[in-house]
Image (cartoon, grey):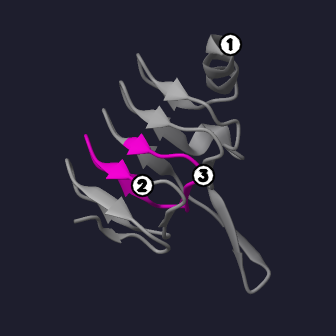
Amino acid sequence: TPSLVWWLRALGAQIGHGVWCESYWLPEADLVHLGDSSTVNRGCVVQTHLFQDRVMSLDEVTVNDGATLAANSVALPASAIGPGATVAPGSLVMRGDRVPPSTSWQGNPIEPWL
């Protein structure tokens, strides 16, 4: 629904033009950056926090212009999906991972999709 994008923007998410976002799993919306024409499919989790040794840490998650986070995938804090890159369904982008532009990745954790 188009109103979801406006609601997420009201919560502080930076969402570009032409974004397809079918997920409401953006726990700390103000730490999420979705570039122009990016896609976050149904069931995705854009996780901006983790607990390690009972300490919560927060960091940004970026899905750059034209990038795709396919259905039921998870992107952990401090990760970035490069412009035009694709993360396959059911994949896990680990904390701090940087997906190079115009590449395809899959798996848990992600690896190049050949």
Contact check, label 2 and label 1, Cβ < 8 Å = no
Return the residue at label 2: 88
Amino acid type at mark 1 = Ser
Q: Return the x and y of residue 35 as percentages of the image width and height.
A: 38, 31
Q: Nearer the viewer, mark 1 or mark 3?
A: 3
Return the residue at label 1: 3
Amino acid type at mark 2 = Ala
Q: Quadrant of residue 26?
A: top right
Estimate the spatial distance between the alpha carbons at disc 3 and disc 2, rounded to whole Å.
Answer: 9 Å
Estimate the spatial distance between the alpha carbons at disc 1 and disc 3, rounded to whole Å.
Answer: 21 Å
Q: Is 26 on the left-hand or right-hand side of 98?
A: right
Q: Secondary structure at mark 2?
A: loop
- How packed is label 1: few (under 14 Cα within 10 Å), some, or many (20 or more)? few
Q: Return the x and y of residue 15 as percentages of the image width and height.
A: 49, 26
Q: Residue furthest bottom?
A: 53
Q: Earlier in the sequence, mark 3 or mark 2?
A: 3
Q: Quadrant of the N terminus?
A: top right
Q: Is 18 on the left-hand or right-hand side of 1?
A: left
Amino acid type at mark 3 = Asn
Q: Secondary structure at mark 1?
A: helix
Return the residue at label 3: 72
Q: Earlier in the sequence, mark 1 or mark 3?
A: 1
Q: Is 21 on the left-hand or right-hand side of 35?
A: right
Q: Residue at x 55, y 62 (%)?
A: 76
Q: Give the residues in magenta.
A: 68-87
Residue 34 appears in the picture as rendered:
no
